[in-house]
Image (spheres, rainbow, N blue to C red):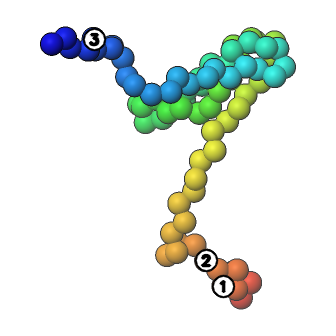
């Protein structure tokens, strides 16, 4: 009985690299230091003459206790 050869690496779909629409280079991940931890900000072009940036969208938390309704603001 023969065993199947195991493959190394993680299974899944390979992520496609994005290309800058202005100069055609591959975009790199932009990081920001916040509270001594790195946080992903988005993608940026490594070409200093280009300066193209794609920012990540962030979902804002909506707490009913902290937010006021429009009627409350208008009455103040």
Residue at 71% over, 32% down: 54
Q: Position of residue 56 (x, y in %)?
A: 63, 39
Q: Position of residue 18 (x, y in %)?
A: 68, 23
- Kindly report the distance in space between the C-alpha atoms of the residues bearing marks 2 and 3: 61 Å
Q: Is residue 33 visible?
A: no
Return the residue found at the far right. 22
Residue at 69% over, 15% down: 26
Q: Residues within 10 Å of mark 2 (few under 14, many from 20)?
A: few
Judging by the rendered image, the residue that carries numbered circle 3 is 5
Q: Are marks 1 and 2 in contact (CB under 8 Å)?
A: yes
Judging by the rendered image, the residue that carries numbered circle 2 is 68
User: Quadrant of the rendered structure where residue 35 is?
Assistant: top left
Q: Quadrant of the N terminus?
A: top left
Q: Secondary structure at mark 1?
A: helix
Q: Does residue 38 lie above or below 74 as drawn? A: above
Q: Secondary structure at mark 3?
A: loop
Q: Secondary structure at mark 2?
A: loop
Nearer mark to the viewer, of 3 and 1: 3
């Amino acid at each position: 009985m023969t065993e199947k050869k195991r493959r190394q690496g993680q299974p899944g779909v390979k992520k496609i690299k994005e290309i800058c629409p202005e100069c055609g280079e591959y975009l790199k991940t932009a990081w920001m230091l916040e509270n001594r931890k790195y946080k992903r900000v988005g993608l940026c072009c490594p070409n200093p003459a280009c300066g193209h940036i794609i920012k990540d969208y962030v979902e804002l938390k909506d707490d009913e206790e902290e937010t006021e309704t429009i009627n409350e603001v208008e009455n103040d």
